[in-house]
Image (tube, rainbow, N blue to C red):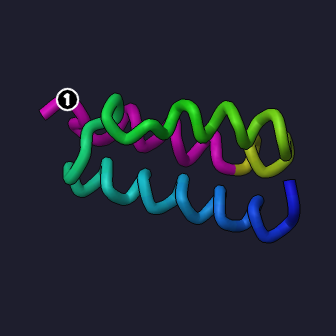
Amino acid sequence: MTERELIKLEATIRNKMEEIKKQRVSLRDSGIGGLMNTLKKVDEALYEKILPEYKNMVTNYNIFK
C-alpha cells in the first residue's frame, strides 16, 4: 500500500468515526471494523494511535440508537 493510500484509509476511518458519533450511521453499518483490520495489517503504529480514539468512541457514544 502506498503512502497516499494509507493517508486516504486513515481519513476514511476518521470520517466514519465522526459519522458514528453524530449518529448518521450505526457502528455495524459503517464497516469501520474491516477498515481497522486492514489498517492493522498495513501500518500497526498508526493502528495503535487510532485504537484508543476508536475505543473511546465505542464506549462514550450511544451508538445503538
Q: How many marks?
A: 1
Looking at numbered disc 1 in the image, what kind of residue is underneath it?
Answer: Phe
Residue at 31% from the left image edge and 48% from the top image edge: 20
Residue at 42% from the left image edge and 53% from the top image edge: 16
Residue 29 is left or right of residue 9, and the answer is: left
Percent across and percent down for residue 17 are: 43, 52
Considering the numbered disc 1 on the image, is that residue within a helix, a strand or a loop?
Answer: loop
> Is 51 a magenta residue?
yes
Residue 52 is left or right of residue 40, and the answer is: left
Percent across and percent down for residue 60 are: 33, 39
Disc 1 crowd rating (10 Å Cα; few below 14, some 14-19, many 20+) is: few
Identify the residue at the far bottom of this view. Answer: 4
For the stretch drawn in magenta, the main secondary structure is helix
Percent across and percent down for residue 15 are: 45, 61
- Of the 4 image quadrants, the one containing the C terminus is top left
Residue at 78% from the left image edge and 51% from the top image edge: 46
Residue at 25% from the left image edge and 36% from the top image edge: 63
Residue 17 is left or right of residue 11, and the answer is: left
**In the rendered structure, which segment of residues is drawn in magenta?**
50-65
> Is 36 a magenta residue?
no
Residue 1 is left or right of residue 60, and the answer is: right
**In this figure, which residue is indicated by the disc labeled 1?**
64
Percent across and percent down for residue 5 are: 75, 62
